[in-house]
Image (spheres, grey):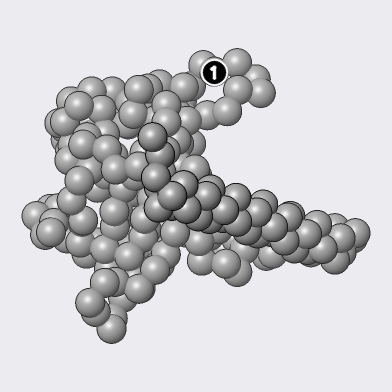
Amino acid sequence: MISRAQRILFFTMLIAAVTMAAILIRLRERAQDRLYRAQSAMPLVEPVEAPPTAITLLIPNDADGSLLESQRSLPLPQDENARARIILTTLLSAYREPHSTHPMGGASLAPGTETPGVDEVFLMPVPQSKQGKMAVVNFSPSFGQMHPSGIEPETLTLLSIIGTLHANLPDIAQVRFLVDGRQADTLAGHADLTRVYVASDSAMGGGQ
């Protein structure tokens, strides 16, 4: 038989659960309202395209394990996160160009198919430091699946990404990698994605 104290506890927990659900629903509604207001406030005119900016890409050369500098020019937004993502997207596109020195799967994708690559790049202050920023690079889920497996090609890809970020955004002192928003053990079975890489360390020996 259920005691009076147990009934009180049950109804108290039930009320708390209902209250919490109501609060979460209200918070979601408020977030949707803010999003709607922000979208409504957006200008209807096309934004003015930024002037082209010179960038440096460090493209791997699988033949000798080096990184080849390649200069490009393209319009970049003011937001550093968006700038970093566009720069890396351009870098990964270079991997798929004809006669690439670091060929990667995806060159023959059907038109309209999303090319695996970098979903987002987030810049934040380096933990426990007053200098520099950490770049968190979030790969798309299928990037590792299409990447050639092997310690050398995987390491060269990470070197290329880290070096390109540091060359164009010198404030980046550290780089960390995620896959689909989660920590992954490796890129395609070999290169370590669990560590934090020092951006200025071309030998990638300064992980934490």
What type is the residue that disc 1 sits on?
Leu
Q: Residue furthest right?
A: 44
Q: 181 or 176: which is nearer to us?
A: 181
Q: Residue at (28%, 83%) from the top-left corner?
A: 130
115 and 138: which one is in front? Answer: 138
Q: In the drawing, does residue 196 fall left or right of residue 169? A: left
Q: Position of residue 199 (x, y in %)?
A: 25, 61
Per the image, the residue denoted by label 1 is 109
Query: Horizontally, is 207 left or right of 145 in the view?
Result: left
Residue 186 placement: quadrant? top left
Which quadrant is home to the C terminus? bottom left
The residue depicted at 78 percent of the width and 59 percent of the height is 33
Camera sees residue 173: yes
**Location of residue 68 in the rendering, given as x and y in whole percent from the top left corner:** 30, 46
Q: Is residue 73 visible?
A: no
Q: Residue furthest bottom?
A: 130
Q: Is residue 97 left or right of residue 126?
A: right
Q: Up-down: is 182 above or below 15?
A: above
Count of picture labels: 1
Q: Quadrant of the N terminus?
A: top left
Query: Vertically, is 138 above or below 54?
Result: above
Residue plotted at (20% across, 56% down): 197
- x, y (%) of residue 103? 35, 26
- Residue 190 in the image, given as x and y percentages of width and height: 16, 31
Give SS at disc 1. Answer: loop
When asked about the image quadrant of residue 92, the answer is top left
Residue at (51% x, 66% y) in the render: 80
Q: Quadrant of residue 114?
A: top right
Judge the density around disc 1: few (<14), some (14-19), many (≥20) Cα neighbours within 10 Å: few
